[in-house]
Amino acid sequence: MPCTPLFSRTPFKNEQTFFNVFENGKMHFETKKNFRRIVFVLATLTLVSWYIYLTSHELSEFVLKNEVPARSPELLLVPTDNEPTTRPERVPSAFENSLKEGIKGCFVYFVNDANWVNARRAIREIEDRFNNRHYYPWVILSSVELMPEFEEYVGAMTTADITFAQIPHTAWLFPQGINLTRAYAPDSFTFRGGDLANVELSSRFLARYLSGPVFDHPILAPYSYAWLVSSTSSYPCDITLDPFLYMHRHNMSYSFVIPFRERLGEEEPTHPSLWDTSLQFIDTHPQYRIPQNQSLVNFITQGSKHGGWNLCHFLPGAIEVLDLRFYKSPAYQEFFIAIDEAGGFFYAGWGPEHVRSIGSTLLLPRSAVKWWYEIGVREAGLAYCPSDLETGKARADCICRLEENFERSSKSCLAEFFDL
């Protein structure tokens, strides 16, 4: 008697499924080939499902173990008990070490257009080159109201504490004594090669605020030093020293990288009234006059006609680190009041870089001003590339060439700074 095969090769008749369930107690498939395909597909699906389960389970455990808590404005520099300890280098930080010496430093960035791309770029530059090893806090001052999304997006660029604040509305009010007709129609004055009438009034308000009132903002009250950050600056080298600690230990009040001269062809300086007002202040406040052998006055007068201002000033954004105690002092605050009463912010387009530069050189001794020859920077088309003091060549960690240095430019005032 012939054996009945377990799987019949006889085709199904009028059958819509793959097999006839029981025929003479046996299961029949259409073909052996189809059966193998079904087994292969089922086995593959089983293996894939099992792999997905295992990987998702392991991923979940990894995320739970390594998840970083969401940032909040109250985030402390010192890790809390429930904060992950995946960054052991954060404790102790240079900021915490500076606290032990009785100083506090911060970065200050001004936002006037809610452009978070520029803000993120500015913070990232500093973090990559310096602050990712130090964790100094950030202060973001804005001329406009910032949305929570902006704060979250920008705050993600740093692991240090970051605080946001708005410039008070009083900064946008005319001070007493300003001739509004003259302020709104400054058509008789040339401003950096253009008509001052084309400069937005809000920019003149902001220039006034950044020249003096900003130092009294409550958000800066806890700090001793401020590093003013620009979105247009870049840093070709790692910043290996700590400017805050250096200035504290050496009793410095102002520091810079690029001393810069404005040149306007054959024209006379566009801000003679600022210099005249500054000299009048020193004449009427002899208690603030620095002795000649310690003074920086030659830096801003050397080479000028009739002993006037030679237009040298410290380039803003190219690393300015300030001792806030000096800019809050009676000497500087009284100087600012005298400048403000002259109305030049609205009549003549005086900028904060001009006011801070002249105020610092007139009111500070030479020993209180530091040139950062150790720090490389690019700003406003100018660059400084530090050299290795032993070899005289560009530092190995710098992405720049010594040939780029602004000292080669006719706009450089470094020679005037050292010829004192």
Image (cartoon, rainbow, N blue to C red):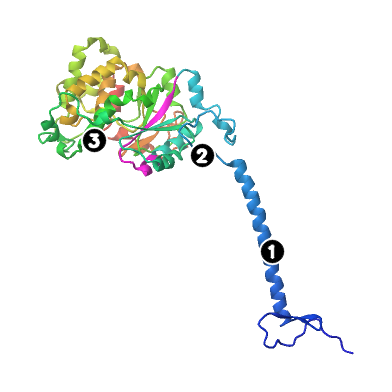
> Of the residues shown, which amino acid type is indicated by label 3?
Ser
Q: How far apart are marks 1 and 3 (CA)?
A: 67 Å
The tag earlier along the polypeptide, 2 or 3, is 2
In the image, what residue type sits under mark 2? Answer: Ala
Which residue in the structure is indicated by mark 3? 203
Q: Residue 157, image x and y in percent?
A: 45, 39
At x 32%, y 23%, the residue is: 216
Residue found 71% across the figure and 87% down from its top? 11
Which residue lies under the disc numbered 2?
Answer: 70
Q: Which of 54 and 409 is in front in this view?
A: 54
Relative to 168, residue 120 above or below: below
Q: Which amino acid does label 1 sit on?
A: Thr
Asked which quadrant contains residue 408, the reply is top left
Magenta segment, which residues? 103-121
Q: Name the residue under label 1.
A: 46
Between residue 153 and residue 4, name the one nearer to us: 4
**Residue 296 seen from this side:** no
Cα distance between the residues tagged 2 and 1: 38 Å
In reply to whether residue 98 is colored magenta, the answer given is no
The residue depicted at 14 percent of the width and 21 percent of the height is 306
- Report, in whole angstroms, how far the alpha carbon at label 2 lies from the one at label 3: 36 Å
Q: Earlier in the sequence, mark 2 or mark 1?
A: 1
Q: Residues within 10 Å of mark 1 (few under 14, many from 20)?
A: few
In the picture, measured across the screen, residue 187 lies left or right of residue 116, that is left
Which comes sooner in the sequence, label 1 or label 3? 1
